[in-house]
Image (spheres, rainbow, N blue to C red):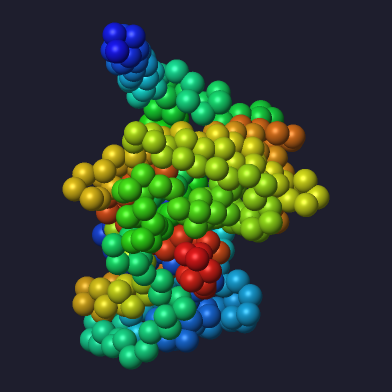
Amino acid sequence: MQHKRNTQTSFFFGSLIIAFAASAVALHMIASPVACAGDLTMAEFQELHEQLQVSADKPWRTIPWKTAMLDAQHTAAQQAKPIFIWAMDGHPLGCT
Amino acid sequence: MLDRESTFADSEIVNLLKTRFVPVAIDQANQRRQQDTEGDFYRKIAGQGPRSDFNGTTQGFYIATAAGKLLLYNNNRDPAKVRRLMKEKLAEFESSDAARASTAAIKTTKVDERYNARLPEGGLVLRVQAKVLDGYEPTTNRWQSIFQSAMSRDNLWISASEHQELVRGQVPRSLQERIARFHLVDNTRGEPPMWKKEEIRRMDMQLRNGRITGVAHLNTAREDRGYETQLLGVVDVKNGTIVRFDMVSKGDFWGAGAYTGGAPNGKFPLAISFTLADGTDIADDLPPQGSRGWLRGYLR
């Protein structure tokens, strides 16, 4: 009986140690900027993600482009202005 | 790409477009084909120009009246030329009856659903932007220089059911294949070839504890074009909705397509970012390039 209690106690503390170690590893994976997908690190991900965003003040992005001919026609009719059409293969505001 | 960094980087052209014209940007591959009121109005204008065969491209710059009268067709992006032509045609327009005549707004009577793709209800839009990080030969050519520093833009659409699977911590196979086929592409110099399903040699993405990781290997049967890459990012969920989806793909790309020539020789580093769109950019509303003419095929 005593032997069984000691085994249960050892098992309990052993499990605690394993759980603690697993938690530490999990926390490390979440918080640390070390490699997570081969060579691509969290630090590199953050740097590239920031770098690969279009600046909102690019001149072409400040133009109030419409994306439908009929929408442009309605405004042109209302404001008595000519329509300027930028027609490309692939959408000129995106895609390429 | 070239137009954005040349013609529409010219401050006078930008100012004219903001104040004196109604600017519209379209993928004419849709409008020249679509059998509806939108397509009819475009073909009415383009049909008066030199590119009136709607079986081929009609790309270029057009200036027209609200009644559909063509005033200019030009397919030269040189800012000085475009600026001069815009001023000439503006003067012509303002001295004509068109500037004073009352023109009725055209009523939409027919919509060709094939060319009017809409984001499925409950779905998500991610901005996708790609850039070649290195590998180009140094150049003094202005146009090549623009290509070499270019960053592309497309949108990734995620369906409502895929959205919910992501919320539950799964990356559905359909989404993984869509990312691989239509968004792990080099579209920095023009319209890229998309990957065929059989060209996905490996695509494995996982989502654990808010971190998304993955590996993708793509290449053609002839191995003349490929991309071997890793994916890493962060996904946040709040109240059953994805509120953050930031991811980067970085790997080695090689080869080019029919409209993306001029790639660096051999393997070169290509990075692609994915970001949840917030609707503040007009391009957030555009359908993905890969969905053109066949949304169901893109979303399947």
Q: Going by the image, does B255 lie left or right of A84?
A: right
Q: Going by the image, does B183 lie left or right of B264?
A: left
Name the residue furthest left. Answer: B239
Name the residue furthest right. Answer: B222
Q: Going by the image, does B211 lie left or right of B58?
A: left
x then y, percent, for residue B51: 60, 76
* Residue A53 appears in view: no
Say which of B300 and A2 sits in front. A2
Say which of B238 and A25 sits in front. A25
Residue B275 placement: quadrant: top left
Q: Give the answer, above or below, for where B106 lies relative to B225.
A: below
Q: Residue at x 74, y 35 (%)?
A: B265
Say which of B65 and A34 sits in front. A34
x then y, percent, for residue B35: 47, 86
x then y, percent, for residue B19: 26, 59
x then y, percent, for residue B223: 77, 46
* Residue B275 appears in view: yes
